[in-house]
Image: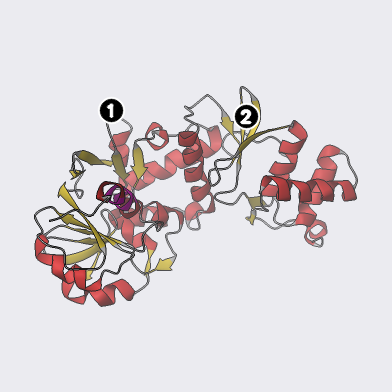
Amino acid sequence: MTRDAGSDLVGARALREWASGGGGAFSRVFLVESHAHADRVAEVAIDTDVVLLPTDSGPWKGVARHVGYTGALREVGDELFLGDRGVELEDYVAAAFVQIVGPTVVCLVDGASSRAFLADAELARQTGVFPSALIDQRVLLANRDALVGPDELEPPRAIRVCADGSVGIGVRGDVIGGIDELRSLLAAPLPRAMALGEGAAALASAADVTSPSWIGRYLTATDIMKALTLANGIARISGFGWVPLDDGSADAEPLETDPFLLDTADGLLLADITTRRRQLLTPASAAVVTVVQTSSTVGIAVDRVAGELGVNAATARTLCDQAIAALDIHLGSRVSAPSSAQGART
């Protein structure tokens, strides 16, 4: 099979999107286990898709970009190669005890893995100590989108066409049909949780994460630690074992990708994973940021800032507006009802 120009970069990016389950550069990514099914996939894959094919698949007949691979990425311990670069599949539980030596996809392979993941997330939320595997730059957490929004419906974006002709979603997700019905399978919205396979039930049974708004924030916090090459104990992250202020009036959680406040050796740092922007803040500015991100309305934030900083409502409103505009922060997502007095303000 002839490789496209730049296929190494395309393949690496496509494999990352396929493993994480999320969109990005490509509409969908197919991992096809056998050359016998290449032509059927070529019939449905569009020009914004990428198809990962065994290198012995012969000439590609479709309009989608395609990349050859060797090996496999199905069972724990499997390794898939794009050229001479390999990616290994590891169980989430085992990843805490093995030495990570190269690019690794860490997967919740069963209920035990899912329960361990939730326990680690809660521990990080309470103490600020994150699991070592998830803050290792060589590690990618499989099916991340399904963990953040398990109940959300969408057509499959990470598709596995198995050697026996069955079609599944995610790294070790559920089988949803057969190759003969591939076109219709790709059009049917499904719960993201189906990509989790055996691990889905354990997540669904955890009542406190049925709508896991903070799981997304937790995973983005691990991204911040990777981006800043932070180890546990080097800095504190707001919302994970530490907050700059706790006035008892927060009624919201920060949005998943909103900038993070960190307490570092250099001072209070605001870091944005989306823009890669970082800046030092004064304690007063950090307090305003915390209040805005944990308030569901501007009115609630104004009352809290006024009380915390000892300023009048007009000044507090100006401080909130300035923080939102200059620092690109946002009001949070409500998790509890504010008092009637707070709720009356907008």
Residue sitting at x 27%, y 53%:
171
The numbered disc on residue 263 is 2
Q: Nearer the viewer, residue 331 or 4?
A: 4
| Residue 34, above or below 76 | below
Q: Residue furthest front?
A: 5
Q: Can you give x and y, in whole percent of width and height, for residue 123 in the image?
A: 49, 36
Give the crowd class for mark 1: few <14, some 14-19, many >=20 residues within 10 Å. few
Pick whichever, 89 or 16, lies toward us. 16
The percent coordinates of residue 245 (x first, y second) are 71, 36
For the stretch drawn in magenta, the main secondary structure is helix
Q: Find residue 93 and report its horizontal and vertical position in percent.
A: 31, 38
The reply to whether residue 174 is visible in this rendering is: no
- Residue 221 position in % (x across, y down): 51, 40
Asked whether, in this view, residue 104 is left or right of residue 317, the answer is: left
Q: Quadrant of residue 337?
A: bottom right
Compared with 69, 264 (above or below) is: above
Q: Which residue is mark 1?
A: 99
Q: Is residue 13 magenta?
A: yes
Horizontal arrangement in the rendering, residue 208 relative to residue 102 (left or right): right
Q: Quadrant of residue 58?
A: bottom left
Give, as a three-letter code, the residue at label 2.
Answer: Asp
Numbered label attached to residue 293: none
Q: How far apart in space, not on screen, are marks 2 and 1 (Cα)? A: 29 Å
Q: Tell whether 104 sits left or right of 126.
A: left
Q: Quadrant of residue 308?
A: top right
